[in-house]
Image (cartoon, rainbow, N blue to C red):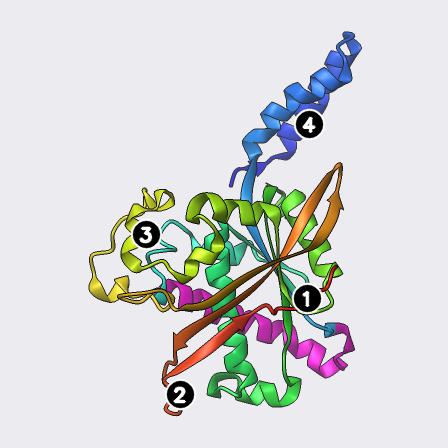
């Protein structure tokens, strides 16, 4: 993403002042300058994650949670790179991790497209499930912090980078959606739904897509086939079929953004995944979101 520099902003302000002094209408100038700003504005997928009732944890637990959250993030990046190489081949996971916007009780991650954001959220929720069930890697800290419950939000909208920080409509709307949800759901905006409609004929098709189908989906035209058979393996889409058990989409309401009204949807995904190293259960189910259809 191109960074918006201080010098460029100063030049735009100077140009605006000069043209208004010459009698040019402000609206005309703003439209002209916006075209220059658009070089630094990109449409990205923003995944918001929030730890439910973080403020109600005691001081000791609150102090440990940001560390725990970072451990789970790092594990999820590793999982995506190891098990979903095909889908993340055009993404710089190091850059995504570097650009993580930390809010203390969660944060925002920026992806190139909503599909990668959904994959990441599934793996993150899988790691939350492993943590809550007392997995060996985080068993000790779980004894202190206790169970974690999360809520998620996904938006697909404009953002820009200035002074090593990210700003824009995508992040603003994401934060507003997260703040309105009290039921620990996975909420997405209409732009995300529209993106999946365009690229996958609907997000529900994640249930029926087979690995060979990705070759015929236009979105993956510039993706290179991975030759190493080991690296081709996907946890979410195995050799023959999709491991998505259910994909439910519920329209739950609207929020106002500037002059626009954004439709909000609740997603409920269930995915069956292979258990790595768990001798008791070879397979387990990850649930992301829930079916509560209450309004915002």
Q: Characterize the local packing of mark 3: few (<14), some (14-19) or many (20 or more) Cα atoms within 10 angstroms.
A: some
| Mark sitting earlier along the chain (1/2) | 1
Q: Which mark is residue 10?
A: 4
Asked whether residue 96 is drawn in magenta, I would say no
Mark 2, residue position: 281
Q: Residue at 51% of width from left, 59% of height from top?
A: 97
75 vs 174: above or below: below
Q: Nearer the viewer, residue 201 or 98?
A: 201
The residues bearing labels 3 and 2 have C-alpha atoms spaced at a distance of 30 Å
Q: Which mark is residue 104?
A: 1
Q: Which mark is residue 214?
A: 3
Locate residue 63 relative to residue 157 in the image: left or right: right
| Mark sitting earlier along the chain (4/3) | 4
Do the residues under discs 3 and 2 have CB atoms within 8 angstroms? no
Can residue 279 be seen by looking at this rendering? yes
Q: Characterize the local packing of mark 4: few (<14), some (14-19) or many (20 or more) Cα atoms within 10 angstroms.
A: few
Magenta span covers which residues? 55-82
């Amino acid at each position: 993403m191109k960074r918006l520099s201080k010098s460029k902003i100063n030049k735009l302000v100077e140009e605006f002042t000069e043209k208004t002094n010459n009698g040019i209408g402000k609206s005309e100038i703003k439209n002209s300058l916006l075209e220059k700003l658009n070089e630094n504005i990109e449409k990205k997928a923003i995944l918001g994650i929030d730890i439910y009732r973080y403020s109600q944890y005691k001081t000791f637990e609150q102090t440990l949670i940001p560390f725990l959250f970072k451990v789970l993030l790092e594990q999820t990046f590793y999982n995506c790179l190891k098990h979903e190489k095909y889908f993340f081949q055009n993404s710089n996971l190091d850059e995504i991790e570097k650009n993580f916007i930390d809010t203390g009780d969660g944060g925002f991650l920026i992806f190139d497209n909503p599909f990668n954001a959904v994959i990441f959220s599934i793996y993150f929720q899988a790691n939350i499930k492993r943590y809550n069930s007392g997995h060996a890697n985080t068993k000790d800290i779980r004894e202190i912090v206790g169970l974690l419950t999360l809520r998620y939000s996904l938006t697909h909208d404009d953002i820009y980078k200035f002074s090593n920080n990210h700003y824009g409509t995508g992040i603003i709307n994401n934060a507003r959606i997260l703040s309105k949800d009290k039921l620990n759901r996975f909420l997405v905006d209409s732009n995300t739904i529209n993106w999946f409609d365009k690229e996958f004929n609907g997000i529900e098709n994640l249930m029926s897509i087979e690995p060979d189908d990705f070759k015929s989906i236009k979105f993956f035209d510039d993706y290179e086939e991975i030759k190493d058979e080991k690296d081709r393996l996907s946890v979410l889409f195995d050799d023959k079929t999709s491991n998505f058990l259910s994909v439910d989409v519920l329209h739950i309401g609207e929020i106002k953004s500037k002059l626009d009204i954004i439709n909000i949807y609740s997603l409920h995904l269930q995915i069956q995944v292979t258990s790595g190293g768990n001798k008791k259960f070879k397979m387990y189910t990850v649930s992301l979101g829930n079916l509560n259809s209450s309004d915002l």
